[in-house]
């Protein structure tokens, strides 16, 4: 394959930094015994990934039923043509933090990609953060 | 929220059609008891989602160890500014089909977003396909 792209591993700190500059990602979790994915908007705040959602969503339901639910969160910025960019993966646990004082003022900053009333703030606590950046060979 | 976007549910047929016009998505699966996500390139062929990967990847390892592994596959095209676009979710099972005659000629069409030698073709058989399209209110 004539491909001059070079993958470089990102440090966890750099990976979390890129995630903080992006606002759109996807969460994977297990519901009813099966893996599923949902697109979400997020902010990174004090090392946590905060998402603002609605208590009726599949993700919120799963977290409310299982505080500390294991999740994966992924975001990327890959150019469709050059296929250069980066991808970040976070493994961690999710909990409802809607009533936490710290998130009261943060919640409104996290917009949903769907225009529905949002009432639930979920924090993902990273346990492992990894990432790759794809650049062109020099 | 002053948001004029209108979500419309897509039929499974339309959702799979959109997925077929996109080549980049993410698979969620459970490995070592924990959910995880990997970005992938795919083609849709005869109702199957085919991905070309390497046998050493976490996804291939999980599928090779558990043929029929439950997975979710998600792709989207959401404009960063207007936040209009679509998202498609497929729930299904994954199996190694590297040696299947049908995939022999398809494999090379499925490019990886990473430039590494690819030797494994995995087929995801959809069990449920859903999707949303976000358009502006007329």
Image: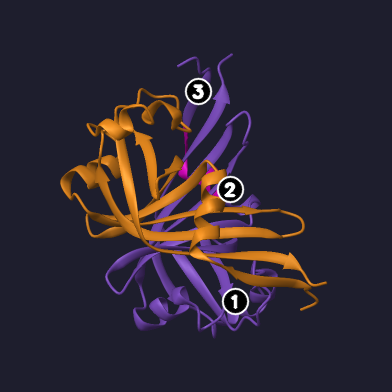
Chain colours: A purple, B orange
Pick the residue in front: B51 or A8.
B51
Residue A34 at x, y percent in the picture: 30, 66
- Does any portion of residue B15 appear in the rendered image? yes
Q: Is residue A86 left or right of residue B133?
A: left
- State whether discs 1 and 3 lie on one chain: yes
Measured in 3D between alpha carbons, the distance from the residue under mark 3 to the one under mark 2, in whole angstroms, is: 21 Å
The local crowd at label 2, few if under 14, some if 14 to 19, many if 20 or more residues have their Cα within 10 Å, is: some
Residue B97 at x, y percent in the picture: 25, 38
Q: Is residue B133 above or below residue B123?
A: below
Measured in 3D between alpha carbons, the distance from the residue under mark 1 to the one under mark 3, in whole angstroms, is: 39 Å
- State whether discs 3 and 2 lie on one chain: yes
Residue A47 at x, y percent in the picture: 52, 59
- State whether discs 2 and 1 lie on one chain: yes
| Mark 2: secondary structure | helix
Q: Which mark is residue A103?
A: 1
Between marks 3 and 2 in the image, the one whose residue lies nearer the viewer: 3
| Mark 3: secondary structure | strand
To which quarter of the image does residue B78 belong?
bottom right
Residue A60 at x, y percent in the picture: 47, 78
Can you identify the residue that label 2 sits on?
A17
The segment highlighted magenta reads A9-16
Pick the residue in front: B107 or A2.
B107
Q: Is residue B96 above or below residue B83?
A: above
Q: Earlier in the sequence, mark 3 or mark 2?
A: 3
Measured in 3D between alpha carbons, the distance from the residue under mark 2 to the one under mark 1, in whole angstroms, is: 20 Å
Pick the residue in front: B50 or A79.
B50
Residue pictured at 67% horizontal, 69% vertical: A111
- Does any portion of residue B54 appear in the rendered image? no
The local crowd at label 1, few if under 14, some if 14 to 19, many if 20 or more residues have their Cα within 10 Å, is: some
Can you identify the residue that label 3 sits on?
A6
């Amino acid at each position: 394959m004539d491909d001059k792209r070079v993958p470089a591993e990102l440090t966890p700190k750099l990976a979390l930094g890129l995630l903080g500059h992006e606002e759109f990602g996807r969460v994977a979790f297990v519901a009813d015994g099966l893996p599923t994915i949902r697109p979400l908007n997020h902010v990174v705040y004090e090392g946590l990934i905060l998402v603002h959602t609605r208590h009726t969503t599949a993700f919120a339901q799963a977290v409310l039923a299982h505080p500390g639910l294991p999740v994966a969160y992924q975001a990327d910025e890959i150019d469709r043509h050059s296929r250069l960019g980066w991808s970040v993966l976070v493994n961690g646990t999710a909990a409802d933090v809607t009533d936490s004082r710290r998130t009261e003022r943060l919640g409104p900053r996290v917009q949903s990609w769907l225009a529905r009333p949002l009432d639930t703030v979920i924090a993902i606590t990273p346990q492992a953060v990894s990432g790759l950046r794809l650049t062109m060979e020099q």
